[in-house]
Image: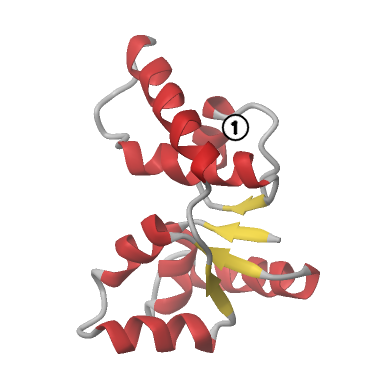
Amino acid sequence: MTLVDTSVLLDVLLAGAEHGDESERRLATALRAGPVVVNDVIAAEVAAVFDTAAGLWSALADVEIELVPYPREAVYLAGKAFKRYRRQGGRRNRILLDFMIGAHAVAAGVHLLTRDRGFYRQSFPGLRLV
């Protein structure tokens, strides 16, 4: 299973996105390997580009992405990772939602498809990145 990050999903859903072709290729590869999912956090971030809820769910279904619940274990992991980041002098351009995405992938033991590999690699050592 692969959790797809917001940036990759927006690349695929928005016409003319700078990384659209690469993200489409990587998403296609992930889909061939198994289920591709988003959580409530990712869906909420993506929802901003749609005029209706129906449009959001239809677009996700069109690219064969399922919504899965956020794992309870990930709540604690996200909070601890965010706190560690801020204590180490991490800039405020990172928000808790970024950590919630990485923590979900760790807690669920799934791959994370993202363009932001450096951040996730540093914040969640051992996370399986695509």
Q: Residue furthest left?
A: 51
Q: Is residue 130 left or right of residue 52?
A: right
Q: How is the image coloured?
A: secondary structure
Percent coordinates x, y for residue 52 in the rendering: 23, 85
Q: Residue at x 64, y 47 (%)?
A: 108
If the image is split into quadrants, where does the N terminus sit? bottom right
In x, y percent, where is residue 8? 49, 62
Rendered residue at 36%/19% (across/down): 83
127, above or below 123, in the image: below
Q: Residue at x 33, y 17 (%)?
A: 86
Q: Residue furthest right?
A: 33
Give the vertical position of 126 relative to 114 (above or below): above
Label 1 SS: helix
Residue 46 placement (x, y as % from top left): 34, 67
Residue at (44, 22) in percent of width and height: 80
Left or right relative to 79: residue 54: left
Residue hosting label 1: 121
What residue type is disc 1 on? Arg
